[in-house]
Amino acid sequence: MLTHTIFIFYLLIFLLSTIGYGYLFANIIFKDLKTLNFGYLGVLGFFAIVLISITSSFLFPHNFTHNIILHAVGLVSFIINFFNETKKNFDQFKKILLIFIILIPGIYVFKNHDDFPYYHLTYALNLSENSFMIGTGNLGHGFRTLSSVFYYHSTLYLPFIKFYLFHSGPFFILIFFNYIILTKLIKKFKKKQIDFVYFFSLLNFTFVNVAFYRIAEHGTDRTGQILLFLTLIVLFEILFTIKSNKDKNILF
């Protein structure tokens, strides 16, 4: 029971830290992005952590010290920004926590992707143990097929859990995707905007949660496909449904 409690605690920390990096990314790149919901900020944060991970891998191994500092910064960023708009963000927190609870069994109930022991695990673990990994592709085919997900996973190497959550990156992407789509569908339904984007969003929501429900088996391809679906929805919104130039610029 204690082990499961620690795992769930860490998963929640990673979730909030990733959203926190979304806020940091917005502060650096385009502050209006902070007006987006936790789902979009989570995707931005995932991207920001991957960039940091790739850059720092040339200088440091992603060991306990590196990762504790990295996620502490993300958590502090989340807390500071959370209290800037407490009422709005508390409402968002309750909703994303509900999705977190609903999806968390997917981490437990299915085996990992077939390629996980072959190179998913070894690539991320190598990043955790070594720095400046040049030429490792000569050691095996797996090291030539890198993924941004591996770099994200290497930042999840922390005390007690070690490498046991190196398959959870897709779990967070699925949470952020569902939060974005559900928020969009509910908002459009309340305003009776039953348009092309509504049905396209509903179709993607249904497909992803029916066809991709085996979270532990996602590997790397399905994470990219989910983000592609989200990109297409946003693109259609920019082209066909959103009238405000400010809102178009933020989504663009």
Image (cartoon, rainbow, N blue to C red):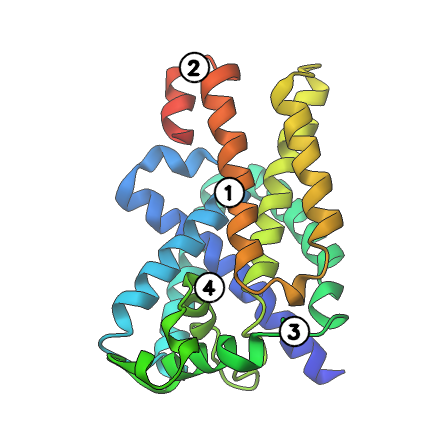
Query: Mark 4 or mark 1, which has the lower sequence index?
Result: 4
Q: Which mark is residue 112?
A: 3
Residue 47 visible in image: yes
Which residue is depicted at the point 44% across and 82% down? 125
The picture places residue 231, in percent across and down from the top left corner, at 49, 37
For label 4, the crowd category at 10 Å Cα-Cα, with few meaning under 14, some 14 to 19 and many 20 or more, is many
Amino acid identity at mark 1: Leu
Q: Is residue 58 left or right of residue 235?
A: left
Spatial CA span between label 2 and label 4: 34 Å
Could you give the CA–CA distance between mark 4 and mark 1, rounded to whole angstroms? 15 Å
**Three-letter code, disc 3:** Asn
Q: CA distance from mark 1 to mark 2?
A: 24 Å
Label 4 sits on a secondary structure element that is: helix
The residue wearing badge 4 is 149
Q: Which mark is residue 244?
A: 2
Tag 3: Cα neighbours inside 10 Å, few (<14), some, or many (≥20)?
Answer: some
Identify the residue at image location x=61%, y=48%.
Answer: 93
Chain-order first, disc 3 or disc 4: 3
Decide: is 67 above or below 206: below
Residue 246 lies, in percent from the top left, at 37, 20
- 4 relative position to 83: left or right: right
Residue 193 lies left or right of residue 210; in this view the side is left
User: Which quadrant of the view contains residue 72?
Assistant: bottom left
Q: Foreground mark, 4 or 1? A: 1
Residue displayed at 54% across by 39% down: 230
Instruction: Find residue 228 and name its label.
Output: 1
Mark 2: secondary structure: loop
Q: Which quarter of the rendered picture does the N terminus lie within? A: bottom right
Could you tell me how far apart the alpha carbons at marks 2 and 3 are, in whole angstroms?
A: 44 Å
Q: Earlier in the sequence, mark 2 or mark 4?
A: 4
Mark toward the viewer: 2 or 3: 3
